RNA sequence: AGGGGUGUAGCCAAGCGGUAAGGCAACUGGUUUUGAUCCAGUCAUGCGUAGGUUCGAAUCCUGCCACCCCUGCCA
């Protein structure tokens, strides 16, 4: 075991440690509670890692609960996709999947109880009137004229709401707290509203639905959640959360803790904006490789362990900062560098003819898929007298900046192969170099030239007659602004024009048989993944996951 | 009559009265059959700011400033 410095505990871990030490809990239970109204994104990945991570760390359990209190915005497509994403990230939820809608009967019963205790009332104010009565930051609100309705009247009215006798918006159930509270969420919040929508789980059973505030804490209590961890914007709701727990005969007393949500520069992490990108067809769906959705990153070739490592590197604190994308990219490269098999792909082919090699000669060079990882296997790379290298690797004239490039009179090492020496090159009418003529230095497979003249550089290559064509989808960042949704900018005005460039390239024959979703490092070029859906051996398709780091001095 | 949060390097942060951890980025060198990786090293006399308490303050106190969130029958 290597002695690594322990990561300092974050404030939530400390709270849990204290609770456990004080005997407040013998075990802990957390929950990840997405609303199924869109796909999960990198911000959710952090929440998932925090909640499931806490459960793992303290030997507890984490529930997956769909917070489905607003049927108008939700769909079963999303509940399926969310499950796939959580599983793919590598987490297992405790027991069955939970839905807030599982508790609609109980929640309704508790709402009736609040009415019976004189703590809730049916309010007929329109939404505009409600807004006026609520007051504002500087001014206290005023009580609704319906606040003092009798318990019997409220009971009857609420039953009529439930029975579907009222139109949407005609009235709602509110809890009687304090219209003068400085915390706006305490000014008689609505806890039930009329929505005559079909619900993806409960169908047409209900036409009234509990609000987030009325459902969340009680659901936590029902499930025995000990630590309900959410993001900072819910901090104002905590007093309300606690109010329901105190005023209702709930089976447990969960507590809410808030941490700062994840922001990353050059990307947007709000479902609303991601949905806009999908609906305006800026991208090809929620799983477009340019999307910061979990399914998009997956299709991009990001691995789940890289995403988890990134999330674990993040602070769980109350600050609201913006993490540099470079930090995400570091963890992607770090994982791929250690695990991605290597292969060769030539993006801009330049033919090299080897004059001292028989035209009908061809041989297979056995190449390890990943150095120092023999279990990753070996493949045959065919070699013959005509090969392609990348145009960028041949220079007409030698220069110090390009000391590792190929040029006439200089030697170059073919990656995993022989050493070549360039003799001449040919140009077309436009002045483009069309062919390089070279000689092969004998006995240089796996060893240096016997004359002691070692090549300075190494280039990747493909045998002409064995090359396989592939489609390459080269992705750049979607936004050209570090903060696309900052200030008074419209994030749709910050889109990069060439966020997707589709080209063709030449790959080793072995790559055509790659399994979908396998990420390779195309040596000296970058990491590319065989597309999860479109790649086949007949028509290979690779997506750029991320480029290799580059020496800035050479750019 | 506003309330709730937060300010430590370019970015993310640890620190909880004893003299500024760590990661990313950047920059120097070295190794290298990937200009990748890897290895070694550099990078805050300073903790939003002004005072105060103390032998000693990023840590305690006071004032001020800045930023984020809250006025959905969304979550």
Image (cartoon, rainbow, N blue to C red):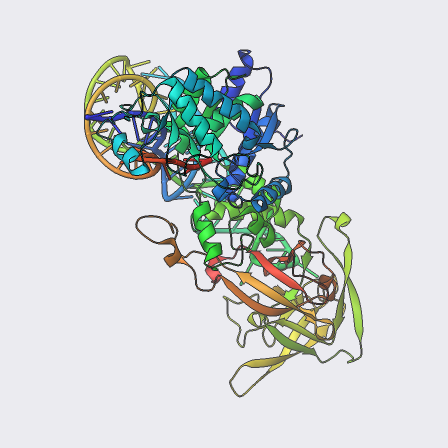
Q: x and y percent of residue A173 in the render?
A: 40, 28
Find residue A1 and report its horizontal and vertical position in percent. Answer: 67, 30
In the depicted view, which residue is nearer to us: A396 or A8?
A8
Up the image or down, A380 lies above or below A130; here it is: below
Total labels: the figure holds: 0
Please give the name of the residue rendered at 57% of the width and 39% of the height, measured from the top-left corner.
A203
Q: Is A270 located above or below residue A352 in the figure? A: above
Q: Nearer the viewer, residue A6 or A491?
A: A491
Side of A365 where A193 appears, left or right: left
Relative to A107, A505 lies left or right: right
Q: What residue sits 60% from the left and 59% below the top? A: A543
Q: Could you tell me residue B3's position as x and y percent?
A: 29, 25
Could you say which is closer to the camera, residue B41 or residue A316? A316
- Does residue A55 sit above or below A518 in this rendering? above
Residue at the spot 28% in from the left edge and 35% down from the top edge: A129
**Residue A189 makes an appearance in the image:** yes
**Residue that appears at 59% across and 61% down:** A525
């Amino acid at each position: 075991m290597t002695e690594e410095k322990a990561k300092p505990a974050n404030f939530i871990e400390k709270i849990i440690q204290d609770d456990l030490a004080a005997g407040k809990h013998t075990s802990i239970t957390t929950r990840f509670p997405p609303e199924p109204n869109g796909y999960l994104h990198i911000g959710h990945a952090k929440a998932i890692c925090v909640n499931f991570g806490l459960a793992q760390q303290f030997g507890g359990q984490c529930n997956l609960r769909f917070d489905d209190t607003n049927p108008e915005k939700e769909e079963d497509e999303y509940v399926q996709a969310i499950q796939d994403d959580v599983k793919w990230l590598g987490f297992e939820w405790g027991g069955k999947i939970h839905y807030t809608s599982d508790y609609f009967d109980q929640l309704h019963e508790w709402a009736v109880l609040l009415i019976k205790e004189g703590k809730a009332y049916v309010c007929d104010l329109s939404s505009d009137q409600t807004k006026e009565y609520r007051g504002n930051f500087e001014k206290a609100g005023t009580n609704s004229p319906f606040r003092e309705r009798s318990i019997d009247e409220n009971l009857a009215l609420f039953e009529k709401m439930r029975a579907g006798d009222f139109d949407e918006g005609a009235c709602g159930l509110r809890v009687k707290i304090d219209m003068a509270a400085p915390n706006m969420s305490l000014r008689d919040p609505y806890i039930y509203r009329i929505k005559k929508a079909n619900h993806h789980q409960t169908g047409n059973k209900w036409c009234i639905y509990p609000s987030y505030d009325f459902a969340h804490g009680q659901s936590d209590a029902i499930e025995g959640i000990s630590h309900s961890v959410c993001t900072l914007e819910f901090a104002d709701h905590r007093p309300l959360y606690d109010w329901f727990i105190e005023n209702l005969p709930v089976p447990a007393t969960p507590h809410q803790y808030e941490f700062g949500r994840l922001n990353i520069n050059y990307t947007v992490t709000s479902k609303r904006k991601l949905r806009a990108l999908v609906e305006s067809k800026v991208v090809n769906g929620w799983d477009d490789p340019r999307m910061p959705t979990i399914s998009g990153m997956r299709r991009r070739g990001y691995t789940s362990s890289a995403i988890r490592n990134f999330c674990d590197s993040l602070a769980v604190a109350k600050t609201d900062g913006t993490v540099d994308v470079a930090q995400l990219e570091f963890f992607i490269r770090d994982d791929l560098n250690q695990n991605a098999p290597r292969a060769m792909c030539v993006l801009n082919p330049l033919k090299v003819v080897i004059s001292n090699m028989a035209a009908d000669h061809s041989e297979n060079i056995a190449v390890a898929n990943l150095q120092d990882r023999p279990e990753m296997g070996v493949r045959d790379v065919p070699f013959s007298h005509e090969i392609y290298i990348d145009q960028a690797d041949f220079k007409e004239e030698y220069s110090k900046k390009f000391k590792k490039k190929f040029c006439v009179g200089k030697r170059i090492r073919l990656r995993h192969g022989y050493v070549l020496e360039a003799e001449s090159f040919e140009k077309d009418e436009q002045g483009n170099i069309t062919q390089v003529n070279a000689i092969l230095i004998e006995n240089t497979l796996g060893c240096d030239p016997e004359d002691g003249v070692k090549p300075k550089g190494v280039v990747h290559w493909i045998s002409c007659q064995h090359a396989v064509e592939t489609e390459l989808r080269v992705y750049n960042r979607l936004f050209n602004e570090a903060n696309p949704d900052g200030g008074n900018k419209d994030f749709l005005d910050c889109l990069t024009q060439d966020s997707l460039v589709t080209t063709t390239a030449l790959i080793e024959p072995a790559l055509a048989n790659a399994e979908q979703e396998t990420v390779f490092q195309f040596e000296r070029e970058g990491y590319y993944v065989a597309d999860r859906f479109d790649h086949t051996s007949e028509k290979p398709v690779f997506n750029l996951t991320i480029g290799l780091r580059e020496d800035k001095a050479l750019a």
